[in-house]
Image: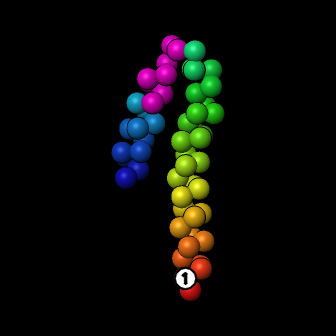
Amino acid sequence: MRGELAGIIDSLAALLADTRLEDDLADLLWSFVAIFHRKIDRLERDLDANE
């Protein structure tokens, strides 16, 4: 899973290289990571609610 996610991030970075979005690349990649963090938080809350 880590390898696949790293590949996605590398591909996204390559896709945005030499574009107007390149200056915002760090913010865009952190937003991508934040999607997974929010999902994990949601799942943990659901699990806690089920206990």
Tell me if residue 15 comes above or below residue 7 in the rendering.
above
Q: Nearer the viewer, residue 12 or 38?
A: 38
Where is residue 5 shown, x and y percent of the image? 41, 45
Let me know if residue 40 is in the magenta part. Answer: no
Going by the numbered disc 1, the residue's amino acid type is: Asn
Where is residue 36 shown, x and y percent of the image? 52, 53
Residue at horizontal 45 percent and vertical 30 percent from the top = 12
According to the picture, the residue beneath numbered tag 1 turns out to be 50
Q: Main secondary structure of the magenta part?
A: helix
Please state the extent of the stretch shown in magenta in the rendering.
Answer: 12-19
Let me know if residue 14 is in the magenta part. Answer: yes
Residue at horizontal 57 percent and vertical 55 percent from the top = 37
| Element type at mark 1 | helix
Q: Nearer the viewer, residue 43 or 23?
A: 43
Residue at horizontal 51 percent and vertical 13 percent from the top = 18
Where residue 32 sits, quadrant-wise, is: top right
Quarter placement of the C terminus? bottom right
Q: How many marks?
A: 1
Where is residue 45 shown, x and y percent of the image? 60, 71
Residue at horizontal 40 percent and vertical 30 percent from the top = 11
Tell me if residue 3 comes above or below residue 7 in the rendering.
below
Where is residue 35 shown, x and y percent of the image? 55, 49
Characterize the local packing of mark 1: few (<14), some (14-19) or many (20 or more) Cα atoms within 10 angstroms: few
Applied colour scheme: rainbow
